[in-house]
Image: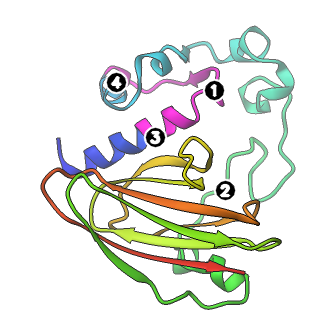
Amino acid sequence: MSGYMKLWQIRSELWQDWYPEMVQRIYLTNPPRLLGLLWKVARVFLSEENLKRIEIISHTPDLAGKFLPPWLVPKEYGGEFVNTVPPGDETGVSIRRKITANDYYKSYQHYTANGIERPKPSHKDVSPSEKFIFKIQVPKDKKLLWDFTASGEIQFAIFKGNNRNDLVFPSLHLITNKLNEEGTLENVSDSEISFEFQNLSGYFTLKLDYAVAII
C-alpha cells in the first residue's frame, strides 16, 4: 500500500474512532455503475460496523417517508427541504466555484486572531518509541495557544497534570508532513497542562518543533 493510501487509512481510522456515533445511517442514492469497485475500495477504509450503516436506495422516492422524514430530504429527491442559507443551492449542496489561493489553509491564524505573533518554537529530538512530555502552568483567566510539526508519525495528547485520563484534547495519531497541527484551549486556566508526544517509529528519531503561548 502506498504512503498516501496509508495516510488516508490512518485518517479514516481516526474519524471512525472519535466520531462513530455522529452518523447513524448513510443513504446512497443514484448509485454509480461502478458501485462494486467502489465498495471494494470502501472496505479498505471503513470498519465492518460502519459499512453496515450504508444503505443503497435504488428507488429515490422511497428516501422521503420510508427511510427519512420528508422535511429532512431535499425537494429534488422527493422531500420537502429547501435550503435558503448561502452559499448552498436549494438542496443544501455548496455551489461549485473555483478554488483560489485565498481558500488555502493559512497556518498560525489563531495567534493573529488573538493579536500576538507566533512564539519562537522549541525543538526536541524524540528517540524511537519514546515519549516527550512538555508541561506548562496556565494562570487563572488565561488561555493556551499551541502548534507543532513532527517529522514522522506520532501519538499526541493534551491532559491535565499527570493524569493522562483527564484529557483536554483527544489523543490522536497524527502526521504533520505538510501542515502544522495547532489549536486553542480556553477552559484550562489555573491548571498544569501536559503535552505528550510519542514517537511511533521503532527505528527513526522524531524531529519535533513546537510553540506554546499563554494569553
Amino acid, disc 1: Glu
Give me the residue at 55% from left, 36% from top. Answer: 18
Left or right of 90 in this view: 135: left
Residue 136 in percent (x, y) is at 58, 71
Residue 179 shows in this picture: no
- Residue 14 is labelled as 3
- Is residue 20 covered in magenta? yes
Front position in the image: 131 or 13: 131
Label 2 to label 4, Cα distance in Å? Answer: 30 Å
Q: Secondary structure under badge 2?
A: loop
- Residue 43 is labelled as 4
Task: Specify which label sits upstream in the sequence, 2 or 1.
Answer: 1
Give me the residue at 77% from left, 74% from top. Answer: 142
Q: Which residue is mark 1?
A: 21
Q: Looking at the rendering, which quadrant does residue 183 occupy?
A: bottom right
Front position in the image: 70 or 188: 188
Task: Specify which label sits upstream in the sequence, 2 or 3.
Answer: 3
Q: Which residues are magenta?
A: 13-36
| Numbered disc in front, either 2 or 3 | 3
How packed mark 2 is, by other alpha carbons closer than 10 Å (few <14, some 14-19, many 20 or more), is: few
- Residue 95 is labelled as 2
Label 2 to label 3, Cα distance in Å? Answer: 29 Å
Amino acid, disc 4: Arg
Task: Specify which label sits upstream in the sequence, 2 or 4.
Answer: 4
